């Protein structure tokens, strides 16, 4: 019984993490001008600049959406 419960909890954790990784904000590279406003507001430092465009690391992102609100060019979109 304990093993079944532990297995079920582990599966639930894995599915939750997988779902979170799939629903993160993303950067529209054609709209990003590299102003770094999003990187400055990100509480987990999940945003970096690559080739002068913002890039979000989905493994670090906590989906707080502060970057979406901070971007003056509307370059960060929410999948939902």
Image (tube, rainbow, N blue to C red):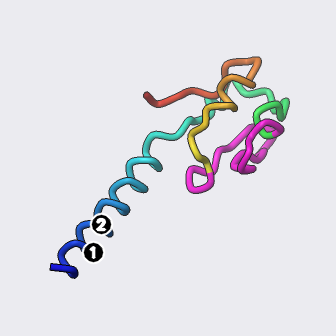
**Is 41 situated left or right of 12 in this image?**
right
Q: Residue furthest front?
A: 2
Q: Nearer the viewer, residue 11 or 61?
A: 11
SS under mark 2: helix
Nearer-the-camera pick, 71 or 32:
71
* Residue located beneath label 2 in the image: 9
Q: Residue at image x 36%, y 62%?
A: 14
Q: Position of residue 21 (x, y in %)?
A: 47, 50
Taking 15 as reference, is 31 above or below it? above
Calculate the distance from the C-alpha at mark 1 to the C-alpha at mark 2.
5 Å
* Res. 74 image quadrant: top right
On the picture, is 13 further left or further right than 35?
left
Look at the numbered discs 1 and 2 and tell me whether their residues touch, using CB distance below 8 Å.
yes
On whether residue 48 falls in the magenta region, the answer is: yes
Residue at the image point whose x is 68% and y is 23% from the top? 69
Region of the chain picked out in magenta, as a range: 40-60
In the rendered view, tell whether residue 57 sits above or below residue 78: below
Q: Secondary structure at mark 1?
A: helix
């Amino acid at each position: 019984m304990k093993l079944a419960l532990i297995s079920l909890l582990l599966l639930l954790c894995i599915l939750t993490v997988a779902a979170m990784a799939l629903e993160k904000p993303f950067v529209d590279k054609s709209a990003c001008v590299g102003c770094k406003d999003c990187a400055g507001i990100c509480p987990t430092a999940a945003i970096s600049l690559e080739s002068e465009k913002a890039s979000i690391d989905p493994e670090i992102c906590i989906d707080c959406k502060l970057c979406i609100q901070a971007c003056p060019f509307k370059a960060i979109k929410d999948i939902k």
